[in-house]
Amino acid sequence: MHEIALADRIKIKEIRLLSDDWYVLRKTTFEWLRADGRWQTQSRETYDRGNGATLLPYNLAQRTVVLTRQFRYPTYANGYDRLLIEAPAGLLDNAAPEARIRAEVEEETGYRLGAVSKIFECFMSPGSVTERLHFFVAPYDAAMRVGRGGGVEAEGEEIEVLELPFDRALEMVATGAIADAKTIMLLQYAALTLFAVSSAG
């Protein structure tokens, strides 16, 4: 079955719009060609919120990173009784990932970045959410702080800016104080590459 294109293994039968309020929720019924040659009818709900980008600002000389802290209702609804600590992030809204994440970082943290580096992109919850997330890192220093950050009040944002020692941020992952997947991925990347080089040097 490996030589058959995915488009030849799926037959879409019906797509129903379930919700188009905050984002778009659809239910799709399709037939899937299994590896043994049988067609199986399946249905899945997909949540389309668009694609996004996230970025970790880091300072090698200070061994610090900039993160944000804010209320996230879905995590609260699932029993997480804390504000969520995250790397700056946002939806692309039809912009290029680098342009969008630069604007988002400035909006949320007040830092206007110089060079940024894309490290990878991935699907964060492929069982139900269509979003592809673009991951970036960028160095920062105090001279780049051009505003207070905090997000957009009209959009319900109330974002606290955190500048943390990198080692403390890693400890917070271990204790559960940082529980956001994209942020953990960025911190682990930084531990394996950015700050590993800094420590070796």
Image (spheres, rainbow, N blue to C red):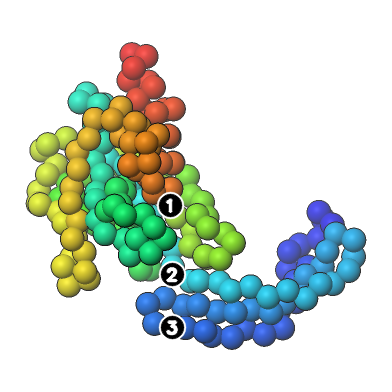
Evaluate whether residue 110 shows in this view.
Answer: yes
Amino acid type, residue under disc 1 in the picture: His
Along the horizontal axis of the image, is 43 left or right of 167? right
Along the horizontal axis of the image, is 181 left or right of 177? right
The residue indicated by pointer 1 is 134
Q: Residue at x 55, y 79 (%)?
A: 26
Between the C-alphas of marks 2 and 1, the distance is 14 Å
Q: Quadrant of the C terminus?
A: top left
Q: Residue at x 34, y 43 (%)?
A: 178
Element under label 1?
strand
Between the C-alphas of marks 1 and 3, the distance is 24 Å
Compare residues 74 and 42 and report the one nearer the observer. 74
Lower sequence index among marks 1 and 3: 3
Amino acid type, residue under disc 2 in the picture: Arg
Along the horizontal axis of the image, is 55 left or right of 114? right
The residue indicated by pointer 2 is 49
The residue indicated by pointer 3 is 20
Front of the two marks 1 and 3: 3
Residue 162, x across and y down, in percent: 19, 43
Lower sequence index among marks 3 and 2: 3
Q: Quadrant of the N terminus?
A: bottom right
Q: Badge 3: how crowded within 10 Å, few (<14), some, or many (20+)?
A: few
Amino acid type, residue under disc 3 in the picture: Asp
Q: Residue at x 16, y 56 (%)?
A: 150
Lower sequence index among marks 2 and 1: 2
Between the C-alphas of marks 3 and 2, the distance is 10 Å
